Image (tube, rainbow, N blue to C red):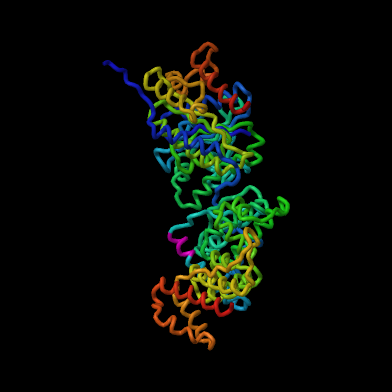
Amino acid sequence: MKVIAFVNNKGGVGKTTCTKLMAEYLSKKKALRTLCIDFDPQCNFSHQYLQMEIDPVAPEGLMPPIHPDYDPMDPEDSGWDGRSSIAEIFYGEGVVPYPTYVDKLDIAPGHAEKLLTAESVRRSEVVEKVHKQLAGFLNSPDVRAAYDVVVIDTSPSKGPLTISVIKAATHIIIPSVMEEQPVQGIYGMLQLWMQESLLREKSAPLKLVGILPNMFKQTRLHRDILESLQHSDAIGKYVLPVKFSQRIVFAEIDAADSAPRSIFDFPDQHVAKIEAMEVCSQIAERIYHE
Amino acid sequence: MNKKKRFHISDALTRGLRDTIQIAESNTDLFRNVVLPLSRVELDPDNPRQLAICLKDVREGIDPMDSQFARKQVELEKLEELAFTIKASGLINPIVVYKSGEMYRVVAGERRSLASILAGKQEIDARVFSEKPKGFELKLIQWIENTAREDLSLAERLDNMRDIVKEYQRQHGSVELTATLIKSITGLSLSQSSYYLAALQAPEDVQCHIQNGNIRNLDKAALISTISSADVRSQAMAACLQGASLKQIKLVISQQKSLHKNKLPLQTEQRGRTTVKIQMGSTAKPQVVKTMVDSILNQSEYNKYLTTFAQVDWMDLRQTTKAFRKLVEILELEMA
């Protein structure tokens, strides 16, 4: 089972969009049973697929809606409040993924309050536990039997949540806008990748699929920064030969009432679909045929 | 001069990116650095260092009925000093372990492990080898970790080195042990290697003193070991045991040697022209000549020459030389 994560500790570089496109590509185009996970307390990714609700305990935080399979009358569901997020792994509860409008694609949504709590732990023993928790969950026989691939959206941080994802992942992709500050985010992520690599056994490496230029505009700034990354001897080979351009359509489909809901349901000639196919197939190629 | 603005990422960032990638790519999988729960750490019974104190003593306290109670108590006090620094500033170097079933066995870092337990730590930084290092590598790691330590006795260091050599010879056939070989195995300097070689091949009496802890210094042990004459060796040893410095021991040896040389029948090489005369040698001490002259003139048959030498200034080298020649002349005359 591959575990693919989009990571960058700078916000606004398009992690959520990339995660969504990749998850839909793998489930729709590759027919893989896909689980996507929202590990960002902001829960933007969950909101793409579920009608997230305001958590009454933390007014600004979101929580998952009642699960469609929840039946208060069913004795099996007693002791469950009908909501389930990926954050349950930190509280010893089971995770019940939600179906999405895409066939074969399930989501384990975020839960703002619970994820923030996990992110803010500082005591070393607890941090250790948080770090290992996601890997433990994804390695469980149930998850391995139910899914072929897992795609994870992460929070813009280098904290325990992101480290937990790095420890659970088999492949990471670093999306970045071609500007100085997001490129510094690349550096932060490469540091995590390096540290984790040194801990991994050779048989279970953490592969860096590459740096994905995102929200690219044909401006001198973006072109020059991209070029200087491509021409750097060590970094160059990790810069993916494809990129996502800055397109309003990627934002438009996020609206719940957009139609179609997925870029992959657009006509084949649509420029955004062509680009999404190019990028996602390139990433899939690197992951599945290395 | 309407130059277009060019953009690039900063040199520092480029360098950071490149270095990070290179470190990650060069991961050799030889070992991994992790944080281990101390409850999963156990000591290696084959470690050349022989601490009497064990995990149980540290965890549960030393049993007063223990036959080694006193020794363990001393060790425990030393460990507590280390524990104090660990509490204050943590562990500087990770211990080295390998996985042995459910447990991690300490290759290097016994004292650090025990002291960390004393310091109340739950976990310890460790470098984990994926498998038990092979005999030779294992001994070598322990050796390298241990040589950096001051509290290891010379006997322990030599035992350790002996194990390494034995292990090396087991793997590579019995090659002749030379300083160069020790140098190539351990990476020590050639002079250090030759000291070790000498100490390893020390005669039994020296070995005995090393074992008893009477000789604690490798240089001294090596120096004394190379003395072939048992007499001179025991003199040098005596000086060493009285706390003589390396220089002083060397002086004792050279004195003893020259003393010894004179006892031996003089052997000269039979080469070149036939020797027809005796060279009388030379000395910078006029006293030597005066002593010879006096002792000869003391004999009754030479008494008559007393006046010949009465005027000699024995402080003057030229006069003394003349006097000596005169003496030889007289002797030849008398014996003709």
Furthest toward the left, the residue is B1
Is B249 on the left-hand or right-hand side of B139? left
Residue occupying the point 56% across, 71% down = B258
In the picture shown, does residue B5 fall above or below B193? above
Q: Is residue B87 magenta?
A: yes
**Residue A47 visible in this rendered orientation of the protein:** no
Residue B51 is situated, as x and y percent measured from the top left of the image, at: 59, 67
Stretch in magenta? B82-88
Which residue is more in the foreground, A120 or A212?
Answer: A212
Q: Quadrant of residue A34?
A: top right
**Image label count:** 0
Residue A139 is situated, as x and y percent measured from the top left of the image, at: 62, 41
Residue occupying the point 50% across, 53% down = A125
Which residue is more in the foreground, A78 or B134?
Answer: B134
Which residue is more in the foreground, A213 or A22?
Answer: A213
Residue B175 is situated, as x and y percent measured from the top left of the image, at: 70, 53
Q: Which quadrant of the figure contains the C terminus of chain B?
A: bottom right
In the picture shown, does residue A113 fall above or below B94? above
Q: Quadrant of residue A199?
A: top right
Furthest toward the bottom, the residue is B300
In the picture shown, does residue A246 fall above or below B264? above
Residue occupying the point 58% across, 54% down = B96
Q: Main secondary structure of the magenta part?
A: helix
Q: Is residue A13 magenta?
A: no
Q: Which quadrant of the figure contains the N terminus of chain B?
A: top left
**Residue B280 visible in this rendered orientation of the protein:** yes
Residue A44 is situated, as x and y percent measured from the top left of the image, at: 45, 31
